[in-house]
Image (tube, rainbow, N blue to C red):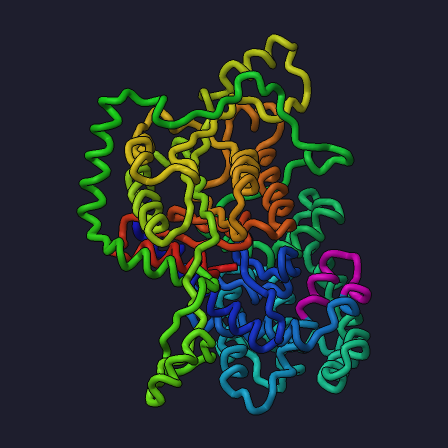
Amino acid sequence: MTQQDIRKVRQEERVAELCAGVVRAFSGERDLHFRGRRLHRGRMPLPWFAPHLHPSPETDDFESFRGVADGLALRIAGSDATLHRTLQPEEPVERMLFEMLEQFRAEALVPEAMAGMRRNLRHRHEQWSLAFHHSGLTETARGLLLYAVAQICRARVSGEQVVEETEDMLEATRFALAPRIGHALGGLRRDRFDQAAYAVHALAIARTVATMLHEAGGDDEAPDARQNDTDDKRSVFSLVAEMDREIVEQHVSAQSGRSRLLEEAGAAYRVFTTEYDREHEAATLVRRELLAELRERLDRRIAAQGVNLARLARELRALLAVPERDGWDGGQEEGRIDGRRLARLVASPAERRLFRVEREEPLADCVVSFLIDCSGSMKEHAESVAMLVDVLARALEQAGVASEVLGFTTGAWNGGRAQRDWLRAGRPAHPGRLNERCHLVFKAAGTPWRRARAPMAALLRPELFREGIDGEAVDWACTRLRARSEERKLLLVISDGSPMDSATHLANDPHYLDHHLREVLARQEQQRDIAIAGIGVGLDLSPYYSHSHVLDLAASTGNAIFREVIGLMAGRHRH
């Protein structure tokens, strides 16, 4: 991934955070946030809503994103989702039209005092309309009909004009629509404050226009090239969905999907064999002489970074430590009377130091675990990641916080001995995970940094980086954390992509491991005893992690990159 790609991802993350803040502020719902460019309420994704609410970072400006945020806020605040689901039709094209009309109603409810919000909504509508038109979709009868309906209905509900650039193009279609939807169209603005009454008109328009769209489809194709009714519905719906698919595909985020095998009734994540699974002290896998060379290389990189370690330690102590009572300080001029000093008052009536105050010391009853993806694609980031966790482990120790550094990889490429056993067994269906799991301990939580200094350099050993089975690694790291006595526990997972093991994917399905990772994270987060966050190395990990941050390891110098991680610990980044 190039630096330009990373900058784009980070910019998208900042825009998403700002937009989510707008939606939360207006709607009053604190648990709304974007994950994978989709709005979520807690862990549940909200519907995609209308097609114009999906701007492209490639072509749309910031005002478009503000308009989308305002549109989402108005929809959540002004539309009864339960009522909408109850009323929406089953037929796909009708459902799409009904959804679009309900969004227009919600946007028409913008308060009169919020002229900026109205301007943002108008700007976003115009940008989407022109993109639809310039893409060539209005060159077909169906595309032009759909475009005309969107323009005419929004203009009627909002009381605003249609997009000026395409106004002349709509006249013939507007004339054809008038006798068929004129009555229902007149009711849209009249009943815009009553969702149920408005829905009656919206459903009538959706049914009529869906019929016209299917009829128009016949005019675009030769008789022998016409497809069945199901394909025609899909082609009509794709007029709107096509642009949105391109946006989602171009977004630089972790590729996540659903596993058919794990979704089947009663299906559970499987492991074909655990015979070859290993947990290693990382230092035992590297020759001592080579480990010393790698440590020197890591020290040079840290020195070049120019880190203020003492300052980092103070920031971490301020974040992770909590005040604890630690006795009393006597001889004070104010506070509580100290009975042991009253005799001095008799001997010296002017004595004022007769009080004591309770002493509080910051105590960091916390443990932080770094879980590093040691898959092949992480090789190029190994030195930067090693520098990051080494410095943070030292700073955490100075702040009085325990830390451990873990890694996960596989014992072989393409399945190794586990896959050979599966082949000998006759290739049974759904074997589950089909590789040799390898977990690495670079620094245990109970080990001081001074003793872990050399083992930490094993992160620079490229032979350790193979494939990644993330879900099992997260479970393993959480198990280790729960064995600790500290009250507060944090797990930071550092990765640059989705789980990947070629043998497992080929024997099961392509999303077997990333589906399992999502299940593991959902289960672990439900227990609420461990705060889990994902650090994406140039990649958005929000499809998996509720709390995540995109990190550009190459661009930041000094303490900046460490403050980003501290900000993630404090919950100041995407969630």
Provide residue 395's location: percent of width, then percent of height.
32, 51
Residue extending farthest to the front is 347
129 on left or right of 283: right
Q: Which residue shows up at 76% across the image and 62% down it?
A: 211
Report the predominant secondary structure element of the magenta stretch: helix
Q: Is residue 514 above or below residue 122?
A: above
Residue found 39% across the figure and 31% down from its top: 376
Q: Nearest the camera: 15 or 246?
A: 15
Q: Position of residue 142 (x, y in %)?
A: 64, 61
Residue at the extreme bottom? 113
Task: State whether residue 372 appears in this view.
Answer: no
Q: Is-magenta flag for residue 3?
A: no
- Reply yes or no: does residue 90 show up in magenta: yes
Residue 573 sits above or below residue 455 on the image: below
Residue 275: quarter of image? top right
Q: Which residues are magenta?
A: 85-100
